[in-house]
Image (spheres, grey):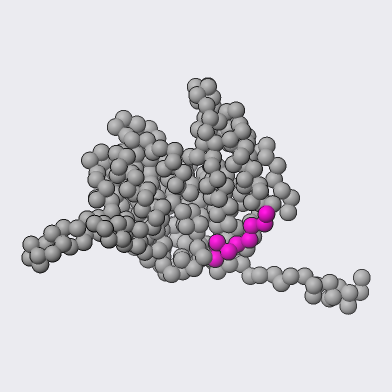
Amino acid sequence: MNEETINEEISHLPPVEPPPEAARIFHEIREELKKVFIGQDEVAGQVLAALLAGGHVLLEGKPGLGKTHLVLALARTFGGGFGRIQFTPDLMPSDVTGFRLYDMKSQSFELRKGPVFSNLLLADEINRAPAKTQAALLEVMQEQQVTIDGETLTLSAPFMTLATQNPVEHEGTYPLPEAQLDRFLMKIMIDYPDHIDESSIVSMASSVRQSSSLASLRVVCSVQDIIRAQEETAQVQAVDELIAYAVDLVRATRESRAISLGAGTRGAISLVRVGKALAVMNGRRFVTPDDIKAVALPVLRHRVQLTPEISISGQVLDDILRGIIENVPAPRL
């Protein structure tokens, strides 16, 4: 093939698009998080993917693994507002959303906004509050707005809830119903760091105050940059074959004999949304089957239930899901 023919072939190829701007922003955020959230790179990456996809996260892990530190650090990197709710059995819905208080001096009702009026909300031990209070938060997560005394107030974008659960203590808790669990985009498991990382954490925490370490983080972008990154992520291409693959994975959970409750359609939607976020974080404008596979566990694990026989046998849910993921053929693109 001569040079003229080669040039003619190249001219017919589609132009190569530059990587998304969101990829640069989230790479810088991730590098900042590594300074204070050590040894949990996978967890940080999944949380960032959820933020890009515009969803909420359920964090499950034992106490003292830095969940609060992660949310504070993330809010710091883009100058976002941070709110925290410590869920307890006596917590009321108004403690979450806010209320109107009568001011004797002005002879009028004054609005006191709740912690949900922030960009990042940490709902600590969400399963310790009664169902009515849980439902109030989950309604806010779904609607992105709050109604107080008949007045509807829209939350500022971006809004992301990171709710935590303690997998050890179940006494005095109110487990989230399946329909409410489905509102979370991902369920992320946090485990203990390895010996080297844990030593680094202890050394840093014992020599520097938490507020000082957070103050050292750079603000790498603005709230508006995060909103634009979310919009850019939504425009990432997912071909029909990939959407069909996401649907096949979800349907396979319903057909498995080891699972009594399979994932619904929202599970397939979430697979594609988080797959797009992962593609952006890797500098691509298109989703691959590997993106879907990489996010399948955190997206599906809280949407399915094992049969009683499998649960009693001691088999782990993640292992069952891994088997399903391996058995569903991925498209070749």
**Residue 237 falls inside the magenta stretch:** yes
Taking the image as shown, residue 277 lies to the left or right of residue 170, namely right
Q: Return the residue nearer the eye: 303 or 191.
A: 303
Residue 311: x, y in percent? 50, 25
Q: Return the residue nearer the eye: 53 or 35.
A: 53
Quadrant (top left, top right, bottom left, bottom right) of the C terminus: bottom right
Residue depicted at x 41% and y 43%: 180
Quarter where residue 148 is shown:
bottom left
Q: Return the residue nearer the eye: 38 or 165.
A: 165
Does any portion of residue 158 appear in the rendered image? Answer: yes
**Residue 106 falls inside the magenta stretch:** no
Residue 248: x, y in percent? 64, 43
Quarter where residue 233 is shown:
bottom right
For this orientation, the residue located farthest to the bottom is: 4
Q: Give the range drawn in magenta.
A: 232-240
Residue depicted at x 40% and y 35%: 167
For this orientation, the residue located farthest to the front is: 150
Residue depicted at x 43% and y 69%: 224
